[in-house]
Image: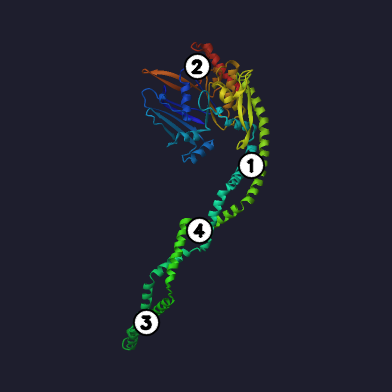
Amino acid sequence: MLTDLIIKNFAIIENLHATFGSGFNVLTGETGAGKSIIIDAVNLLLGGRARGEIIRTGEEEASVEAIFDLSEEPLPGQKLVAAGLDNNDELLVRRIVARSGKNRIFINGSPVSLTQLRELISGLVNIYGQHEHQNLQRTETHLELLDYFAGLQEPLKIYQSAFSAYQRLKKELSHLNLAERERQQRLDMLAFQQQELQNAHLKIGEDDELEQERALLLHAEKITAVTVGGYESLYAGQQAVCEKISIVADQLEALQQIDPHLGTLAKSLQSNLYSLEDIASELRGYAENLDFEPQRQQQVEDRLALLTSLKGKYAPTITELLDYLERITAELNDLSDAEGRREQLRQQLQAQNDLLFKFGKQLSQQRKEAAIELANVVERELADLAMARAEFSILLVALVEPSMDGLESGEFYLAANPGEEAQPLAKIASGGELSRIMLALKRSVPEGDGVKTLIFDEVDAGIGGEAATAVGEKISRLGKDLQVLCVTHLPQVAAFSDQHYRVLKEENNGRTTTKLNLLDTEARVAEMARMLGGSQVGQQTLVHARELIKSSRALVA
C-alpha cells in the first residue's frame, strides 16, 4: 500500500508531501491545478521516462519519493531480499532527475538501475489512464486475469508441471540427437582419455610416496655415506665410540669401592652405551636395506612426470582424476548406447506429450467457458459505467506449439459502439475507456493481477448522472479490498471516497506552486459544493453537497 508521496521541484510543484490511507482516496481540483502532474510524478517512480523539462524553473533537480507498506505483501519483500536490499516491511523509492542528465534511483537507501526499479516495483501499483504504465495494454496479462477469474490456478499449475517435464525430456533428446560426426568426435576423445587414465593404473597417495622416494634417490650417496660411516664410527671401526665408552665404564665401575658415586656414573654410562649400540645397529640395518638402482631414479621421474601431465590435463589430484575417469566412463556408456537411450526418450517424450495435451485441453475447455462468463460479467459492469452497448470478449487462439501458459494465447477485444468490429483492446481503447474497463475487470476479478494499489485517471471521462454514481459506488466497493487513488471532476464519484484530497494552485512571490490538502468534513463539503456549483456556491449548494455525501455512504454501507 502506498502510504506517503513526496514531490520536490517537479513541474510547478515546489514541495508536496501527501499521506494516503487504505480504501478509496479521491483527488479533486480545478482544471490546471496540477492533478495530472501528481500522476506523472507517480509514473516516474514506476520507471517512466525522465525528462529534464519536468524540473521546476530555477532548480537543478527534481525528486519524487514514495513509501510503501509491505507488511501484508510478502512477494515485494522477497524481491528486495533477493536483490540484496534491506527489507523491513517497508519500501522507500526515490528518483532524482537532474538538468545535468545524471539521474539517480534509490530503493531503501541503496542505488539501483532503472531496470531494477521496474522489476522491484512491478506488481505494487497500476495506473489506468493516459500513461505508459498500462497493465491492460500488456496482452500477456489477459490470460492471467482470465485464469484468476475462473480460479484455474491449480489446473494451470498441473499443466505447467507437465510442460516443464516435457521440455526437460525434449532437451535431453535434442542433446542425444547431435550430429553423428560430433557424437563420434566426442566418443573418440573420451575413449582416448579413458584409455590414458586406465593405463596409468592410478593409486591414491602414490604421488606423495613417489615424491618421498625421489628425495631419497637424489641424496642416495650422501645417505649411504652417513649411515655406513655412522655405524663404523659408533661401533665397528677401530677406536669406535662404543668401545671407548665401554672402557671408561669398566674403569669407573672398578673404582666404585673407593667412591660409590663413580659406580653410579658407570651405570649411567653403561645405559647410554646400550642406546648407542642400538642406534649403531639401526644404522647398519638401514644401510644394508638401501637399494639404489641407477634405473630406479629414472622410473620415479618418469612416473611423476606422467602424473603431473594427467593432473594438468584433467584434474589437480589423483582422487579427482579417478572421479573424472568414472564420469567419462559413464558418458561413454551413454554415448555408446545412444540409439537405445534415444528410443527410450522418444517413448517417454510421446507419453509426456500425451499427458501435456490432456491437461492442456482440459485447461483450454475451462478457459473457453470462463471467457464467455467473464465477458458477460464485464459487459454488465460496463453497462453501469456509460458503456452499455460495448461488447467485450476474450479471443483465445490456439498456439502452434504449447507454451508455459497453455495451448493458447488470450487477448481482450472491444467493440465500444454498436456496429463496430471488435478490435484488440490494447490498440483501440482510449484512456477513459481503459480505466472503466479495468474498473469493471477489477470488480469482476479483485485479486486478478495481485496489484494492491490502483490509480484511476480519467475514469469519469464522458460520463455523468447515474453512470457517475455507479462509477463512484464501484470504486468505493473496490476500495474495500484494495487501495484506490482516483483523480476525478465528478462530485458523484468523489462523494464515495474514504479520504478526499484537494489539489490547488497557489501563487506566492510571483511563483506558482501546486498543493495537495487532505480535507476535513467541512472542507470536503465546501469542495463538493464547488464541484456541484462551480463559482456560484450558495447555501443550497452546500446542503446538496452534504446530502450527496450522506446518500453515497448509505449506498455502500
Whole-angstrom CA distance, mark 1 to mark 3, is 86 Å
Amino acid type at image mark 4? Leu
Single out the mark in the foreground, 2 or 3. Answer: 3
Which mark identifies residue 235? 3
Contact (Cβ within 8 Å) of mark 4 with mark 2: no
**Residue nearest the observer in this picture, 474 or 541:** 474
Task: Answer with mark 4 or mark 2, whichever residue precedes in sequence.
Answer: 4
Task: Answer with mark 1 or mark 2, whichever residue precedes in sequence.
Answer: 1
Q: Which residue position is annotated with label 2?
A: 526
Q: Does 554 appear above or below 66?
A: above
Name the secondary structure under disc 2.
Answer: helix
Amino acid type at image mark 1? Ala
Q: Quadrant of residue 395?
A: top right
Name the secondary structure under disc 3.
Answer: helix
Amino acid type at image mark 2? Ala
Residue at (46, 66) in percent of width and height: 209
Determine whether, in the image, residue 12 is placed left or right of residue 447: left
Task: Please tell me how crowded label 3 is: few (under 14), some (14-19), or many (20+) other residues with Cα within 10 Å.
Answer: many
Q: Does 338 appear above or below 530?
A: below
Q: Which residue position is annotated with label 1?
A: 162
Task: Answer with mark 4 or mark 1, whichever residue precedes in sequence.
Answer: 1
Whole-angstrom CA distance, mark 1 to mark 2, is 61 Å
Name the secondary structure under disc 4.
Answer: helix
Q: Does 501 appear above or below 188?
A: above
Whole-angstrom CA distance, mark 4 to mark 1, is 39 Å
Task: Please tell me how crowded label 1 is: few (under 14), some (14-19), or many (20+) other residues with Cα within 10 Å.
Answer: many
Colour theme: rainbow
Single out the mark in the foreground, 1 or 2. Answer: 1
x and y, in percent, of residue 394 in the image: 63, 27
- The answer to whether residue 552 is seen in the rendering is yes
Whole-angstrom CA distance, mark 4 to mark 2, is 85 Å
